[in-house]
Amino acid sequence: MIEHTSRQVPKEQIAHQLDCMEQVSRHNALLPEKPLFFCQTFGCQQNEADTERIAGMLAEMGYVRTEDAQEANVIVVNTCAVREHAEKRVFGIMGQYTHIKDTRSDVIICMCGCMVQQEHITEKIKKSYPRVDIVFGTHMLWHFPELLLQRLNGSKRIFAISGDPKGEIAEGLPVQRGAGCHAWLSIMYGCNNFCTYCIVPYVRGRERSRKPEDIEAELRCLVAEGYKDITLLGQNVNSYGKDLGISMDFSDLLARLDAVEGEYRLRFMTSHPKDASEKLFATMAKGKHISHQLHLPFQSGSDAILKRMNRGYTKESYLALIAKAKEYMPDLVLSSDIIVGFPGETEEDFQGTLDVVRQGQYDVLYTFLYSKRSGTPAASMPDSATQEEKQDRFNRLLKTQEGINQQRQDAYQDRELSVLIDGLSNSKDGVYTHCGRTDGGLLVLVRGEDLHIGDFVDVVIEKTSLRALYGSVLGKGYHG
Ligand code: 5AD
Ligand code: SF4
């Protein structure tokens, strides 16, 4: 019998949060003007999705969103711990926001997310940022109404961090999504992989999957509300369901969701190569709504480094995997993450990475210089390359990919593609008035008559650049 590690937050506790929201809402209703909230998000899509939940709770409590922190009554900064650079930026921003209290002492300043799950960070906030009111970790997100109510009622500054790595799943709380036709849909939280460079498993806890029926119900709502571009989210979606003790893997979930009727596209991220299967590619190829897009981070093209990263695959098995994916989906749009300068990386190791980049022919690459994260195994691994050498490798990687990108973009010249219009473009020529995404997620600037956000259109690509494709509309319509 598999142990069920996914724990749902009990209904009574959700009801308690809803009650706290009601109390804050009543308090706010007595104010002469509606109070304002400002949210800033650092980091990944999971953080963006979390911020949408915080915004949903704030809206429910009577706050109205502002894009100007200076006028906000509540400020929330959702932080990222994946690289040092993001942490430094967060502390810089916190300095600015806490100054707002010089003139408006009643503004409530909150910090949440991955960064504050680390003890040395909370210590620093305690000592050096006395004007931060509420600090809550990733596992405490759903407690936010309760925490805010406490602070409004005059409690001392609050540090709500749970160290329990198992985590919980809270259903039934509000979400405020961004404008437009794109929506995030979290299917699982946490990560069990412990790649040796990565802080995520320590700050987001163990993998826990939402129930398929909850995910499907949310998808149905999103489609009914008019969302057309829906991204399923998880640190490693390919291990979906393992903790649920049900006979459903990620491919089965995808197939079940794909059966939901409507005009929409379904994407997902992130896939770990060690868990991506032929079954997944077959499901994608067969799907009606599933985009032929795959984000498959390889991190390094050296077997020795992959081993030290604890990635669970080799260069050869990775290359075989993407060849298989392209066999099923010749039109696949492929992206990846790469880390340059992992401890002990030699020039030869790096050449392996360049080789994968050349063979993989990615449409999009996210490249990172290794950033030491305290508490991770890689932080104590010996390192020999200098910062200059690492930077030089990084620049060569960018240059290699730039050439590939240009070729790949050029290959779309004169092709007909289905594009979902998702915004107005800021194209200077005034010709390509709208922007949108192809099935694979590529950016297209579009020209045509009578275009509306949310339209599916067929375009022919007229010109290309590194950044975007440019197309004119041939006709409208959704092809599932
Ligand atoms: N240093 C640099 N990049 C990192 N990533 C994760 N941890 C680190 C780190 N310590 C990158 C990986 C991952 C992406 C989300 O961030 O490439 O796939
Ligand atoms: Fe980090 Fe690896 Fe988990 Fe991705 S799979 S979140 S890189 S530990």
Image (cartoon, rainbow, N blue to C red):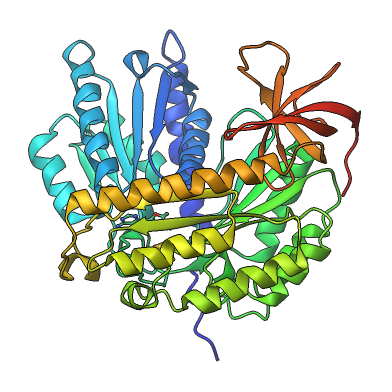
Quarter assignment of residue 124? top left
Say which residue appears at 53% left-offset and 87% top-offset.
2
270 vs 127, left or right, is right
Quarter assignment of residue 173? top right
Q: In this rendering, is residue 434 above or below 274?
A: above
Query: Measured from the top left, where is residue 416 in percent x and y?
Result: 84, 39
Tell me which image quadrant ligand 1 sits in.
Answer: bottom left
Q: In this rendering, is residue 269 above or below 305?
A: above
474 vs 187, left or right, is right
Q: In this rendering, is residue 311 above or below 197?
A: below
Along the line of sight, the residue nearer the viewer: 232 or 465: 465
Query: Measured from the top left, where is residue 16 in percent x and y?
Result: 45, 48
State the quadrant of the N terminus.
bottom right
Quarter assignment of residue 419? top right
Query: Measured from the top left, where is residue 460 in percent x and y?
Result: 83, 33
Along the line of sight, the residue nearer the viewer: 240 or 282: 282
Query: Does residue 83 appear anywhere in the picture?
Result: no
